[in-house]
Image (cartoon, rainbow, N blue to C red):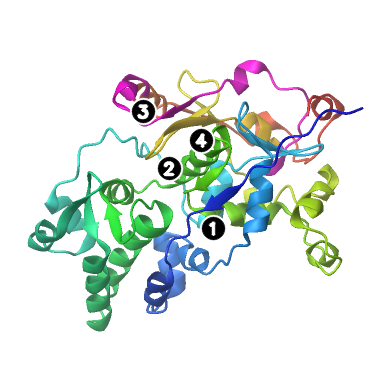
Amino acid sequence: MDFGRKKTQKYTFKRPKLEDLRTLGSLVIDTEAFSKRYGHFLSLLKINMEDGRLSTLIQFYDPMYHYFTFLDYQLMPTLEEYSHLIGVRISSQAPFSGLEEDPKDQDIAKATHLKMSEIRDHMTIKGKMLGLTTKFLMNKAQYFARMRSVDAFEVVFALLIYGLFLFPSFDDFVAMDAIKIFLIGNPVPTLLVGAYHSIHMRNSHSGGMITCCMPMLYKWFISHLPRSHAFWDLKDDLLWSQKIMSLTHSDIVWYSCDYDGVSIIDSCGGFSNVPLLGTKGGINYNPILARCQLGYPMRDKPKNIHLEGLFFKECEDCKALKKKIVNAWRHVHKLEKKVLGKTNCVSLEPYLKWV
């Protein structure tokens, strides 16, 4: 039976210039302490992506339900997985919304070991966005490193990672949004929405440039692929699309024991799933479809109410909706292990039939 074919779309990926960040990374004295304080960003900076794998993944994005659907299984990046992979917990602090007031110079100075006079002198506008120049922050990071001011060096380096790598806007520029996210200290939801929102928007426009933090999405995808040498050996000349198309539910690496005991953010406030706000707008994702990735079975066809879609681009008219989402994040609903049952990464027939 012919179910038809989806037309292959062409995607490109914005690649931030990482040479200078990697050079700064080599100046970190205690990498373990840095990772505990800020996250596993040093290892993320070293990832060399292969576009073929990400291009293949994004072909399978389903814009209606906001996940990647393959032959007989689904995959979707989750808050819990992103939190684990970057080594930053999801705090109880409400994530970035875009409704926050710009931080005062003294607030930035207090958090970064910079002087208020320096911040005032180097705060500039690029593309209607307020922010700090990369040159200024790079020079300060190098100065702190020479002076062996470890805390000051690391905090400025971390801010550069946020502005140039995790939440990039313009080249050689750390935008105010990235500074806000850094000061709030709860980057995981904003990082996840960046992936969903960018892919969803480009999918809706039949391809184009994906601008989110692609090494993060790449690391997440690779973590679910088979670990056998047979899969990774490409001497048989199979394209990545053919490799991935050959996989079934039983081939996927579903779960790591690192997630034992992790409670799942299932919904927020009056939303039946999880709404996310980012620097470009908002979108929701559907945790009910990711149970296997956190160690629990997929039993039945999900109810439509848990798959309701939300997507919007940044605009003046969306303030009311954003306020509703911000309020919802003050009432996060989590599912504990006792509710989800025995750890068992299986998909039962009713769910598989629906897929």
In this picture, is 42 found above or below 295?
below
In this orientation, which residue lies closer to the viewer: 272 or 2? 2
Q: For the residues marked 4 and 3, what is the alpha-carbon distance in whole angstroms?
A: 22 Å
Question: Crowding near pointer 4: few (<14 within 10 Å), some, many (20+)?
Answer: some
* Residue receiving disc 4: 201
Left or right of 177 in this view: 204: right
Q: Magenta includes 6?
A: no
Q: Position of residue 75 (x, y in %)?
A: 69, 41
Q: For the residues marked 1 and 4, what is the alpha-carbon distance in whole angstroms?
A: 19 Å
Q: Which residues are magenta?
A: 292-321
* Residue receiving disc 2: 190
Q: For the residues marked 1 and 2, what is the alpha-carbon distance in whole angstroms?
A: 15 Å
Q: Residue furthest left?
A: 117
Mark 3 residue type: Val
Q: Position of residue 184 (x, y in %)?
A: 31, 46
Left or right of 260 in this view: 154: left
Q: Judging from the image, what secondary structure is the residue with disc 2 in? A: helix
In this picture, is 153 found above or below 170?
below
Mark 4 residue type: Met
Q: Quadrant of residue 299?
A: top right
In front: mark 3 or mark 2? 2
Q: Which mark is residue 326?
A: 3
Mark 2 residue type: Thr
Q: Position of residue 330 (x, y in %)?
A: 38, 28
- Picture quarter with the N terminus: top right
In front: mark 1 or mark 2? 1
Question: Crowding near pointer 3: few (<14 within 10 Å), some, many (20+)?
Answer: many
Residue at image point 67% right, 32% down: 289
Question: Crowding near pointer 2: few (<14 within 10 Å), some, many (20+)?
Answer: many
Residue at image point 33% right, 54% down: 170
